[in-house]
Image (cartoon, grey):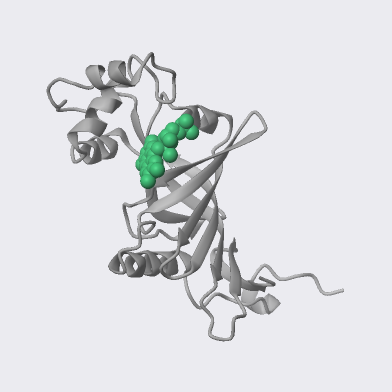
Amino acid sequence: MKPLSDDPIARGDPIAREDPIAQLRTDRAEAAAREDPLASLCMLASVDGGEPRVRTLVLRDLAPAGSVADGFAATGFGLFLNRTSPKVREFAQSDAVAVLVYLPSLAVQYRLRCRLQPLPAHEVHDSWRLRPAVPKRMDWLYEQSPQSSVIGSREELVKRLQGPEPTAAPATAVGFLLNTDSVERLDLGQANGIHDRRRYTVDAGRWIEEILVP
Ligand SMILES: Cc1cc2nc3c(=O)[nH]c(=O)nc-3n(C[C@H](O)[C@H](O)[C@H](O)COP(=O)(O)O)c2cc1C
């Protein structure tokens, strides 16, 4: 029997016409233009000792998507977080996360299988300086009271967030870039009512597109 070629074209696999990350960028820009409240957000799922966890995060567009390498594509999307939080502790168990973006204004969902890549501290700190005053103070509060820990009362929280606006980020402010090897796009907005679902996977340095049963 003839061995399978490493080259997806020679193998006859469908090659993606579109880079799914470029498509995600275009869809997010369109959603933002339509004032979609979810345009800048994602849901990030991680695992803590086998238990699933999920939360909403701002998905920042930090850089143009990078090339496909080592089985993963650099999305150029990033997250700004605090190292004291449960989620960042979970990342130490595994840097594999699932990211979901739903854009109701376009009726489009993306699901990405990702690996996290820490951002250099200077990039985190440059971005941190642009944050509003309360999130800046909150990041400093985490030094004494970790994010997601219990505090005595709402009054105590408000009191501890008074004071001058901090000028520099604490060392616990961190950021991560998302690299992906699998992107799925589900488009519910078809005139004939049949949803369009496509999966893009990295193979031999390029994107392969497969049509999925929606
Ligand atoms: C619209 C929205 C945006 C959010 N953006 C962020 C964010 O960018 N970074 C962050 O650390 N938490 C963000 N949060 C809070 C998280 O959802 C979560 O409550 C917090 O990070 C604690 O998560 P953890 O206990 O899983 O670590 C956001 C929440 C909402 C509702």
Residue 40 position, x and y percent, is 35, 55
The residue lying at 70 percent from left, 76 percent from top is 11
- Quadrant housing the C terminus: bottom right
Q: Position of residue 81 (x, y in %)?
A: 37, 35
Question: Picture coordinates of residue 70 (x, y %)?
Answer: 54, 53
Residue 26 at what x, y percent from top left? 37, 69
> In the image, what residue occupies the spot 37% across and 64% down?
28
Residue furthest to the bottom in view is: 192
From the viewer's perspective, tell me whether residue 33 is left or right of residue 73.
left
Can you see residue 201? Answer: yes
Q: Residue reaching furthest right? A: 1
Residue sitting at x 56%, y 68%: 186
> 152 or 192, which lies in front?
152
> Relative to 128, is 82 on the left or the right?
right
Q: Quadrant of residue 157?
A: top left
Ligand 1 quadrant?
A: top left
Please tell me whether residue 13 is drawn above or below residue 177 in the rendered image. below
Total labels: the figure holds 0
**Residue at 58% in and 86% down:** 192
In what quadrant of the picture does the N terminus appear?
bottom right
| Above or below 86: residue 159 | above
Q: Is residue 79 visible?
A: no
Q: Is residue 13 left or right of residue 30?
A: right
